[in-house]
Structure formats: C-alpha cells, structure tokens
Amino acid sequence: MWIELLVGSSAAIIGGAAGFIAAKRVEKEKFTIYEEQAKAKAKAIEHEAQLVLKNAQVKAQEAEIAAKREYEQKLEELKHDYEMRFNELREKESSLKQMFKDELKHITLEKQDLKAEREEINKLRQEYERLKAEYQEKYNEVLEALQAQAGFTTEEAKQLILQKVEEESRADIANIVRKYEEEAKREAKRRANYIIAQATTRYAGEFAAERLINTVSIPSDDIKGRIIGKEGRNIKTLEMLLGVDIIIDDTPNAIILSSFNLYRRAIATRVIELLVEDGRIQPARIEEIYEKVKEEFDQQLLEEGENIVMELGIGQMHPELIKLIGRLKFRASYGQNALGHSLEVAHLAGIMAAEMGGDETLAKRAGLLHDIGKALTHEYSGSHVDLGADVCRRYKEPDVVINAIYAHHGHEEPKTIEAAAVCAADTLSAARPGARREVLEAFLKRVQSIEEIALSKPGVKKAYAINAGREVRVIVNAELISDNEAVLLAKEIAKEIESGVQYPGEIKVNVIREQRAVEFAR
C-alpha cells in the first residue's frame, strides 16, 4: 500500500513538474511574440520619423530657396530705387547749376544795364546844364531886347516873361502835381492796406447785434395773470422799478420785455425769471429780488471788466473805469455792441501801433477806453466823447488816451502813433460789412444829402450814391470841367460831405469826366 502511495505521489509530482514546464514554455513563446511585435512597431515608428524628417528638410530647403529669391528681388528693387533717386538728384543738381548760371548771367546783364543807364543819366545831366545855360543866355537876350524896344526895365521885363511862362506851364505843372499826388496816394494806400491787413489777419472779432426786445419763457399762461397782479399792481411795480415796457399778449408761454437800454432789459429779464421760478409775485418780493439782481449785475460787471483788462495786459486801472468797461456790454451803437466794438478796436489798434513802431500796450488801452463815455450817456448829459475824456482825466489816464478819445470823432488831430492807430481801428471796426445796422429812413436821408452836395457844384451833370452810401460817383460836363479841375472838384465835394453829413467810416468821391469826339465819313 505504501508502495502505491509512493507511486501515486511520484506520478503526481512528475505530472505537476511537466505541466509547470509546459506552461513556462508557452509563456516564453508569448513573450517572444510580443517582443517581435514591439520591434516591428518600433521599426515602423522609426521609418515614419525618418519620412517626417526628410519632409521637414525638404520644406526647410524650399523655404531657404524662397527667402533667398525674395532677398534677391528686394535687393534688385532697392538698387533700382537707389539708381532712380541718384539720377533725380543728379538732374536737380544740374538744373540748379544751370539756374545759378542763368541768374548770374541775368545779374551781370542788369549791372551792365545799370552802368549804361548811369552813363545816360550823366549825359542827360550834362545836357540839362547846357540847356539851362542856353536858356539863361536867351532869357537875358530877351530882357535886353524888350528893355531896348519897349522901354521896360529889367524887373518889368522879367515879370512879363515869368507871367507868360506861368500861363503856358500851368497845365504842365498841374499834370505833374496830379501825377505825384496820385503816386503818393497809391503808396500811402498800399502801406495803409498792408498795416490793416496785418492787423485784421491777426484778429477776428465776433459780430454782435443787439435787438430791442427780450423774450422770457414761462411754464404756463397762468403766470401772466399773476405777473399782472390784482388791479395791475405787480406789472406797474415791475415797470416802475425795471424801467422797461412789459408786453403781455397772446404769445403762448412767453412775455416780451422792450427797452432801448440793454442793461435795464438784462436786469428785467433776470428779475422776471427769478420771480417765475419762486412763484411769489408781489410788490415787496419784486423789490427784494430787484435789489438782489442789481447787486449781482454790478459785481458781474466789475469781474468782467477786470477779466478784460487782465486779458489785454494793459496794466492797472481804476476800479470805476473797470466797472464802466463792464457796463459797455449793455450799450450798443447802430446795433453793434459797444464792448465788442471797443475790444475789436483795442486789438486792431495794438497790432497797427506795433507795426508802425508805437507802444502796443498804450494803443490797446486807448482803444479799449475810446468809447468809455457811452457807458455814461444814459445817466449824464453831453456827448460820449466829452464824458469819456472827463472820466479818464478824473482817474489819471495818460494824455494819449485823452487824445485818442477826442481824435476818433475829429474833435482833435491825432498827436501820436497810438492815437492815429485807434482812429484807424475805430473806422475799420465800424465800417466793416455787417458790423452795424441803421434805420432805413436815416440811411436814405444821408444818401440824399450826399447826392445833393455833389449836384450843387457847377459843371456836374449827374451824381449817384452807391455801395450803401460809401461811394458817390459824380459825372461832370467835359466841356466845362477839365481834368485838373475834376481833381479839385472831388476834393471840394469830399470836404463838404465831411462837414455836412454824419456817416460811419469813409465815403469815396469819384469824379468822372468823359470827352467824346464823333465824326462821320461820307
């Protein structure tokens, strides 16, 4: 039995060993297969990597070739551009050299011409001296002959000859005078136009035209009844305090304030706006708000005047004058705001004075104050010229300022460059198109007066005022008026217009004389 057990055990052990060995062999064969598969995949990956590397190398070579080709193309373009610019510079250099040669030749020719002209002038001078000596000799001979034949003394003969020569030479003298007078006028006009152009190109002022009414907007028409008040007490109080006419009509949501005084109209507008906002409209409240607004306006006028003086850079000025400058904002002349006009004159006068070698700051000061009297004309009697000069004297303004105030309306002659610049700037500011407007009736009356002055002169056939009354064309009879007399006639008409007509700016007098000769060939 033990033998059977041993045999069975041995058989089991042998069978297990044989199975282990068989399993081991199977595992080894599987490992070999996996290893071969991995090697095959590795070879495939290596082959694919080699293909990618080759493709990358090919692309890199293509990119290098393309870059090289582009570089060569750019290089050719730059070379071509360089050659073109070089040729252009060479052409310009040659043209400049030729131009310099031509200019040198031209200068040489001019020098030769000047030399020839100088020689000609010397010859003419010598000829003049010879003719002068010959004339004196002939003159002495005539004197001796007259004295011998007519029994004249030397002095009487001299007077007779001089009278004859004067009569024959009058026309020549008049022509020469007119020629040089026209040349002087052209030169003066050219210089004046240059100075004015320099001034106007450096300053452009705003156009400000004031109306005679202000319109106050109200939220509803119910406010109109409250403004009128019981038995009209509120509106009577308003008109008495404000000094304006209050027009309440059918205009929806609006009240109209009318007055020639811009300052009062501005205060009235603000007072009514505050009353409408507050809602309490009664006489006591009206007086309270009026006093408050009046104080605010006075302070604003002082601040605005101070700002203007500071911006112009004209130095220190008395506070009362500064306040009057601010009040000019609420003054107008022919629709032109007085403060805007004064600022424009100040800038223009300063620029023109600087161009002519004067004191720019003093000219600006005189220009700003030249119409300061207009801030007082509503409270005091007298012209704004006298009022302005008096107030400037009171506050120790320079004599140039006083002279400019008088001179800009012809009360005095300008004594300095600065005063003359103020006069020119005032005329320029007032006369430029659109600066002022005037009543049609006054305009027509002025035009009619100008034409009547021209027609009253002997020899005048017709006279027409044109260009908005800034020019008058006078047509004269050519048989009665000569060319020289036409010059004198123009001066006479201009002088009479200056003394007899009030007008802004200047008026051009143009005398036209025409002689026509007509004949028929038969």
Image: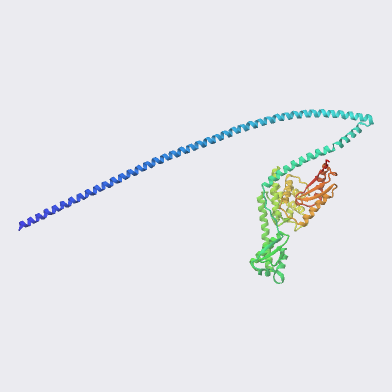
Residue 497 image offset from top left, x and y in percent: 80, 49
Residue 88 image offset from top left, x and y in percent: 56, 35
Q: Is residue 153 above or below residue 204?
A: above
Q: 484 or 401, which is in the foreground? A: 484
Residue found farthest to the front: 522
Point 60% across, 33% down: residue: 95
| Res 318 seen here | no
Point 89% across, 28% down: residue: 141
Q: 38 or 181, which is in the foreground? A: 38
Residue 376: which quarter of the image?
bottom right
Q: Is residue 213 above or below residue 419?
A: below
Residue 453 image offset from top left, x and y in percent: 82, 50
Q: Is residue 378 above or below residue 98?
A: below
- Number of labels in the image equals 0
| Res 125 seen here | yes
Residue 92: which quarter of the image?
top right
Q: Is residue 40 above or below residue 380?
A: above
Q: 293 or 70, which is in the foreground? A: 70
Q: 185 or 358, which is in the foreground? A: 185
Point 67% across, 31% down: residue: 107
Q: Which quadrant: the N terminus? A: bottom left
Q: How is the image coloured?
A: rainbow
Q: Which quadrant: the C terminus? A: top right
